[in-house]
Image (tube, coloured by chain):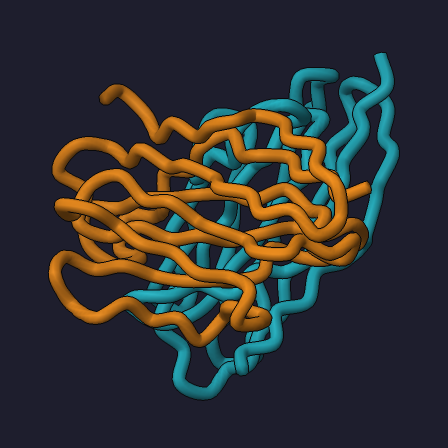
Chain colours: A orange, B cyan
Amino acid sequence: GAGVSQSPSNKVTEKGKDVELRCDPISGHTALYWYRQSLGQGLEFLIYFQGNSAPDKSGLPSDRFSAERTGGSVSTLTIQRTQQEDSAVYLCASSLFGTEGGYTFGSGTRLTVV
Amino acid sequence: ILNVEQSPQSLHVQEGDSTNFTCSFPSSNFYALHWYRWETAKSPEALFVMTLNGDEKKKGRISATLNTKEGYSYLYIKGSQPEDSATYLCAGGSNYKLTFGKGTLLTVNP
């Protein structure tokens, strides 16, 4: 596609429910990242996929968070049993390879847990 | 963990003013420094990727400098316009992962 596409753009969910956030990266980009921005904080790294390599999950804040990338393209970030502190803007980015040349970001999913 | 600091946290300027803000980062093990602009309701947009000490890059009225020895980068905007209003993020890191600062929120008043 022309850009990185994320859905939904907004999600309001009740505490304890599971949510799935989707990211469709630029075709041909081998690297895919998930970040989130909580209120008053910087962008926080969550997870990184590079080609067929094992993902770097070091930024996932708890075992309630998981992500997968199918066929080296679309990625889904799943948050189980959501908590209020999960409320944030979740951003996906892709790049040709790693950080060289910079990231292309999607417009994000604003998640609100009530 | 890489610590990237930005200042000021927010800034209000009048249309036509020139302005600048700072990104500081650890000077050891430097790889690259990125600047992004994030307008409300839009995607963050890459402005510059800088790798060499003394680098200076320019894009229209926006320019950036890099000092890797002392660990800082400046972003300059000449003749600010209301459409420059955005959060400006800097990020440092490795060849595969970036650590972002909290950003500088710039508001340009007409």
The quarter of the displayed image where residue B13 is located: top right
Q: Is residue A14 left or right of residue B26?
A: right
The quarter of the displayed image where residue B85 is located: top right
Q: Of residues A46 and A83, which is closer to you in this image?
A: A83
Q: Of residues B70 and A47, which is closer to you in this image?
A: A47
Screen quadrant of the C terminus of chain A: top right
Q: Is residue A36 above or below residue B85?
A: below
Q: Of residues B27 and A56, which is closer to you in this image?
A: A56
Q: Is residue B108 left or right of residue B28?
A: right
Question: Residue at image x 12%, y 61%?
Answer: A52
In the rendered image, residue A80, in percent from the top left (x then y), is placed at 56, 56
Q: Is residue B25 left or right of residue B29?
A: right
Q: Is residue A31 above or below residue A12?
A: below
Q: In the rendered image, is residue B21 in sight?
A: no
Question: Residue at image x 28%, y 36%?
Answer: A25
In the rendered image, residue A41, in percent from the top left (x then y), is placed at 73, 57
Question: Residue at image x 84%, y 41%?
Answer: B11
Q: Of residues B11 and B18, which is closer to you in this image?
A: B11
Q: How many marks?
A: 0
Screen quadrant of the N terminus of chain A: top left
Q: In the rendered image, is residue A60 in sight?
A: yes
In the rendered image, residue B89, in percent from the top left (x then y), is placed at 60, 49
In the rendered image, residue A37, in percent from the top left (x then y), is placed at 65, 50
The quarter of the displayed image where residue B15 is located: top right
Q: Is residue B1 left or right of residue A69?
A: right
Residue found at the very far top of the displayed protein? B110
Question: Residue at image x 70%, y 52%?
Answer: A16
